[in-house]
Amino acid sequence: EAQVTQNPRYLITVTGKKLTVTCSQNMNHEYMSWYRQDPGLGLRQIYYSMNVEVTDKGDVPEGYKVSRKEKRNFPLILESPSPNQTSLYFCASSLSPTGDNEQFFGPGTRLTVL
Amino acid sequence: TQLLEQSPQFLSIQEGENLTVYCNSSSVFSSLQWYRQEPGEGPVLLVTVVTGGEVKKLKRLTFQFGDARKDSSLHITAAQTGDTGLYLCAGASRTGNQFYFGTGTSLTVIP
């Protein structure tokens, strides 16, 4: 089944404790992206990747890192999480990096930073 | 920076009524997408519009892209309870690799 998977689905952590949220897609998509969703703000793009070893900042990259060493994986790293990073995070992928391609979203990761 | 504003933010209507959701911006987008999101799930694409003035229909849903490619609307005819959900518009940058989502419209259709 074609899908985007994220792990973990739920995470409660404390300020400053490094964490990684994994994202994997099995559709051989070139483009992958991370978003955060907050009430009243919609989804905001954190980072995106147009292909292996090619990543770029989105609208709200501060406090986050990403890597794209393999085509299928695009982990999101929070080196020193803070409470303002409490949010619902979505990973997405699409066939190619053009705006008319459908983005397939993962099920989301709800992160709480205490 | 919130480039796309959606209105209304919340909408509660009776089954069978019609409704329109608006997505507005001062920026030009290369394309615009509409997604629907159910609680506990990621957004799912409904439609992509690319050409200014383009109109697309998906059963009871009609989508329009503004002539200047800065705004869009979603019209639902004879709403059903299954239409309940969060509707999100998303504009793609001129290069196509950055996406800006609207603030979302939460629709509840009451039986």
Image (tube, rainbow, N blue to C red):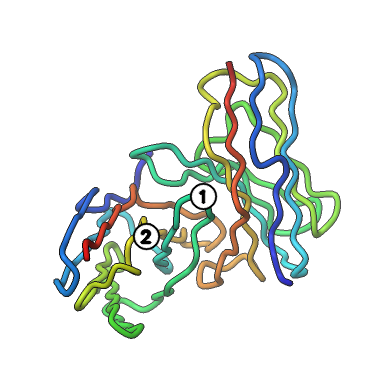
Between the C-alphas of marks 1 and 2, the distance is 19 Å
Along the viewing direction, whichever of A19 and A13 lies nearer the viewer: A13
Mark 1 and mark 2 residues within 8 Å of each other at the beta carbon: no
Task: Name the residue located 36 percent from the left edge and 58 percent from the top edge.
Answer: B85
Image x and y of residue B91, in percent:
41, 60
Could you tell me the amino acid type at mark 2?
Answer: Cys
Identity of the residue furthest to the right in this view:
A70
Along the viewing direction, whichever of B89 and B105 lies nearer the viewer: B105
Residue underneath mark 2: B89
Image x and y of residue A23, in percent:
73, 49
The answer for which chain carries disc 1 is B
**Would residue A100 be found to the left or right of residue B67 on screen?**
right
Q: Secondary structure at mark 1?
A: loop
| In the rendered image, residues at marks 1 and 2 fall on the same chain | yes
Rendering quarter of residue A76? top right
Image x and y of residue B72, in percent:
27, 66
